[in-house]
Image: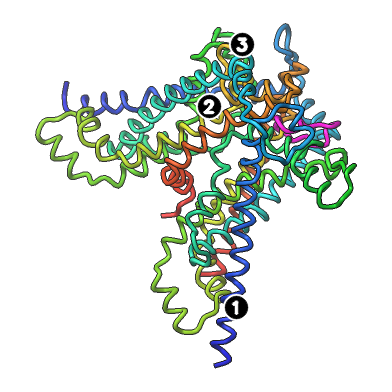
Amino acid sequence: MSRTKTMFKTKTSWKTIAYFVMISFALLTIAPIVWMILNSFKPHSEIVRNPLSPPTSLYLQNFVLSWVQGHLGVYFFNSILYSMISTVITVILAMGSGYALSKFKYRFSNVIYMFYTLGLLITVHSVIVPLFIMETKLGLSNTRLGVIIPYIAFGLPFQVFLATTYVKGIPDAMQESAIIDGANYLQVFFAIILPMATPIISTMFIYTFLGNWNEFILVQTLTSEIAIRSLPVGINSFAGGMSRDYGLQFSALVIGTVPMIIFYLVFRDKIAQGFAAGATKE
Amino acid sequence: MTFKQQKMASYLILIIPGLLLFASVIVFPIFYSFSLSFTTWSGYGKSLFVGFENYRNILTDPVFLHALRNNMLIVAISVFGQIPLGFLLAYMLHRKMVKGGEFYQTMIFLPITISPVVVALLWNQIFSSSGMITALIRRFSGNSQYVMKIFEDKSLAIVPILFVLLWMHTGTYMIIYLANLQKITPSVLEAAQIDGATEAQMLGRIILPSMIGTIATTAIFAIAGSLKAFDLIFAMTGGGPAHFTEVIALYMYTNTFKYYKYGFGSAASILIVALSVGLILILQGTSKRIERKYE
């Protein structure tokens, strides 16, 4: 009797702790975001006077000013362009490599795969200096192409890893029967492998898109013109120093976060899969 | 074209474009960086070969040593903060200790979608003199003149940054552990429960041992991620005031792109790679030893 009693007690105490921890963490996420959104509808003077109070009227001027004068519209467009193009190319190249590395059974495939795996350890910071020098010499700095190329390259190691692991799991039999029927390997890739890999393709796409959308140091270093900079870099130069108007700063932050929160709420499971896949031990 | 040739051609078509990009943007620059790190090149003009002088200068620079200390604190908060907290959260969700677990999971993982730069500016607002924390403290302490001073203290200035890093990344670890906890066969836990095992016993004897591999892998992530911490600090403090919140990646960046010391900056970035590889090797050694203990 006493044993079930203590068990019951420890169970409730675990529950109490669990609720406490969960609620604190959830509040730590919700409170800053709600506070930011509320303040983005207040003029500067009102924010300084009453930082905690909700807006007294629907003041939209902050958004208009930061979108137009702060060039956030331009940055937003560039971010979409960079993220879309480089994500599509990264995923296609990674799928191609994943198929080649897992199904062709060439011995040097292992060497190439190891090469990519080592690439996972290399961060942007360790190559940013030579990359900047190379792009300046080639005339690629301050161009859109000069942003997209490194985006693709840095996306590849992890995406090749995801693609290779997944394609390895597709049974060889399907490929073999198609080859016997006279299909070539590229036809197999487009007609069999790609359709069968749609679950991992969508995970790869969303994960890579998210990474590219939030990327900062490459654009910050390799570009200097407003017309080709992306949202994180633009928000940093606009809200981080140039403007001392808190209302504008908050509206810029809202433009930076709210679309991503919606993106997250729609694709949460896919994003989670991408993160979990890297650390999953089979 | 024979079948063999056709196969080889397809292989090359599939693999070469990616490999070419990877080699020219990542592999070649690493070697380039390595060779630059032994010179005094400043972006133009002559470059002098100076051997290990850049490395010697970096390793004796008090600013670098403070940056290294901050990086080690970031490693510590990741390995001893984010990982255990993320594990605890995942465990609580997996064992269904709270109702509406889905909601909490969504909220805790949410910061991962927000760009680190935006996170930095948001928390700067929260910590600022007209920010949320100051306003809350003023309201509840009754001291209407309260000002936060933590950023002005040489040894404590990094603390708000550590907190924000914890805020940003704990959810990621939670998600990873949650995915792996779901792989433990539920019948094992049920059997233990029927045998009268307490929550702590199940955690310590069944769940933790089967998660050691995953924890070691995430620790590698944490270390690699900690050494490249850049975006957030760049936007939050820029390493200031007076280098109090400097980290190695920022140190490299400032020396290269502000003072045009390309050779010196390259040496710093090579040190980042060396450090992360070194730490990861140490970690792999210890995790193997722990795994062996449980076998």
Structural distance between the alpha carbons of marks 1 and 2: 54 Å
Pinpoint residue B292: horizontal percent, then vertical percent. Answer: 54, 66
Pinpoint residue B89: horizontal percent, then vertical percent. Answer: 57, 59
- Relative to B110, is A187 above or below? above
User: Is B243 part of what is drawn in magenta?
Assistant: yes
Q: Nearer the viewer, mark 1 or mark 2?
A: 1
**Quadrant of the image containing the N terminus of chain B:** top left
Q: Chain of mark 3?
A: A
Pinpoint residue A18: horizontal percent, then vertical percent. Answer: 59, 65
Q: Secondary structure at mark 2?
A: helix
What secondary structure characterizes most of the magenta part? loop
- Relative to A70, is B237 above or below? below
Q: How many marks?
A: 3
* Tag 1: amino acid: Thr
Residue A10, labelled with which disc? Answer: 1
Residues drawn in magenta: B234-249
User: Is A86 part of what is drawn in magenta?
Assistant: no
Circle 3: is it few (<14), some (14-19), or many (20+) Cα within 10 Å?
few
